[in-house]
Amino acid sequence: MASGKPKYYLTTPIYYTNGLPHIGHTYSTIVCDTIRRYKRMRGYDVVLTTGTDEHGVNVERSAKKAGIPESEFVAKMAAQWKALWDELGVQGDEFIRTTDLKHAHTVQWLFKLCRENGFVYPGHYTGQYCIYDNAYVDVKPGENCPDCGRPTETVTEDNFYFKLSAFQKPLLDFYSKNPNFIQPEARRNEVLSFVEGGLRDLSITRTSIRWGIPVPGEEPHVFYVWFDALTAYLSAVGGPQYEKSGYWPADLHLVGKEIIRFHAVYWPAFLMAAGLPIPKQIWAHGWLLMDSAKMSKSLGNVVRPRPIVHVLGMDALRYYLLRETVFGQDGNFSYDALVQRYNSDLANGLGNLASRTLTMVERYFGGKVPAHAPRASGLREEALRGITADTIKDVLRYYEEFGFFWVLERIWGLVGELDSYITETKPWTLADDPSTPGKKESLANILATVAAALRMITILAYPVIPNASEKLWSALGESEKIENVRIDQLEWAFLKPGTRLNKIDSLFPRIEKTEAIERMEAMEKEAQNAPSPATATPAAAPATTGAAAAPATAAALAVAEKIGIEDFAKVEMRVGQIKTAERIVGADKLLKLTVDIGTEIRQICAGIAQFYEPEKLIGRKVAVVVNLAPRKLRGVESNGMIVAASVGPEGRPVLAGFPDEDVEVGARLK
């Protein structure tokens, strides 16, 4: 960060790629984009991060169902999320994917810090796990998840645990010293109650799944979703080099209320354990309800944003989501209310005001802004200027408080005042007899006043409805980019006399309600019945080399950035011959092998027990990575790695070998 401006770093949730976005996800993202635009107009150096959470059992299962590798599945899904945000005018600065190599390095670095500081220990766990919420839950076998109401699964596995119990007092002290850390107040009280009730240590790795970031030296452990996903906020702005970027800690994490606990309890505890700065604020908004239930793909009550954008435009959706619901509270989505807002507020409100103003300036003054004559000012005009000044003051305050409902209520209150002003002053009657003394000046004053106020409205509304605001800004003859206007320095100013105003098509053409609703519902139904974009071209998984001890634990690194030849040269691979092979008690996936590598016989653990019989491996020549640091798997030391391809959606390991060549044991692979 070298701009010299104050920084402001905010994030959306890191969205799970098991499905396509609905307007609940869209709501979070549009709120963040609105804040970003507003803060930039306040002079901040703003960075907005959004992205996709691409690991976990749900992705494994979805990719398997689609018949494609996980890497291909998540790449297609991430592309869909990114494309939608582009359609909605979201100006994301960082799009982080949890399969990015820089993210994997950050997660491993954070784990290392927590472990070195004594807050991580090995253990095992048996309990009920909700794959939909990616969380262990405190229920009995056979019972549903208490949060989402869906079935749970009994899971038993080795884990690494994070000592969350050690952070009860540090967290409560932090909340006390930072009373605005959790917002709104209802969510703060919820978190306080949870922490005061006692904290249990938290599992942060899994061994029952393979699609995740590997724990270095502890294969087959992969990082559990929340330790992985939450860290994306940090990896997006430098990870281990965060001090160099200058954006961490985050000024705002914006999340849905259902994940407040993970962000306000687990995340600050992880950072405390690692000795890293804690974000400044967590804001949890409410849900968008459909038929009084939270939108959910599994419940079949989702509404997608694209049909709305195609019928009404992106600004209509942005306006509706921020105007219809008080931020922080639950809201209810309705196609009927959406079209009603569009017609009343956008078409008949701002759209009509802009059209009337530009048309009258064109008709009565040749399309050029008339000069304002102070001596002809009336009380109504002076009052309107005062109302505009008060509106600016209130809108800035509400933007700062994330009071978007009140922002738009005040702006559209000014739209109503201008409409009333035009109706009361009847400028068209003044234009009928311009020769009468004072009428020409009065007409000029009315239109100059309305044009000036319309300019203020355009600036104030830009963070919410950027597309329409940019069109109106250009129509008002402004050449400077509206996003560069300092909204906090906004005050009454008449447009320069003689400025040429430009005609524009209707900002928001009025639409027939029934027809619009039918079109959107038909498009939504079509979208729900369409195949997932991830299933468009099923393909077999590529045969990639990797550790047979954990066929795809390095899955997150499979879509890695390119390396130089010098990096590859650091890996020493030799031809080995398996001398003995046996199963490891209590480890269904592992075999313990002894392998002759020419200079010595090594003991190596390999995760191939489900695919190879031990006795059939004896005498087989394999490729071995021989310069790996030793690590223990299920208490058995492993001194090397057998190389294998990962084949098919299940990641079946196929050992690399030399069936047709008489290759000397110990020969180096180059």
Image (tube, rainbow, N blue to C red):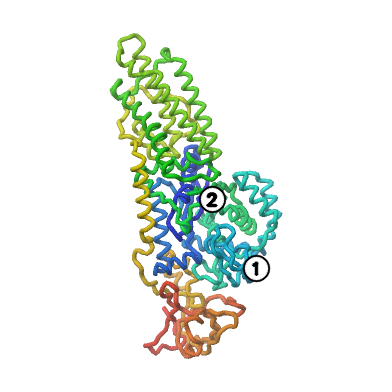
Q: Is residue 23 visible?
A: yes
Q: Position of residue 406 (x, y in %)?
A: 52, 35
Q: Measured from the top left, where is residue 441 in percent x and y?
A: 36, 14
Residue marked by disc 1: 121
Q: Is residue 115 visible?
A: no
What residue is at 64 percent from the left and 50 percent from the top? 190
Identify which residue, 274 or 448, lies in the foreground: 448
Closer to the chain start, of discs 2 and 1, is 1
Q: Which residue is at 66% across, 54% downward? A: 194
Q: Position of residue 298 (x, y in %)?
A: 47, 59
Q: Secondary structure at mark 2?
A: strand
Report how many numbered discs are placed on residues in the image.
2
Q: Amino acid at mark 2?
A: Gly
Query: Relative to residue 586, is residue 250 depicted above or below?
Result: above
Q: Residue furthest top?
A: 437
Q: Nearer the viewer, residue 194 or 56?
A: 194
Asked which secondary structure carries label 1, the reply is strand
Residue under label 2? 256
Rate crowding at label 1 as few (under 14), some (14 to 19) or many (20 or more) other CA atoms within 10 Å.
some
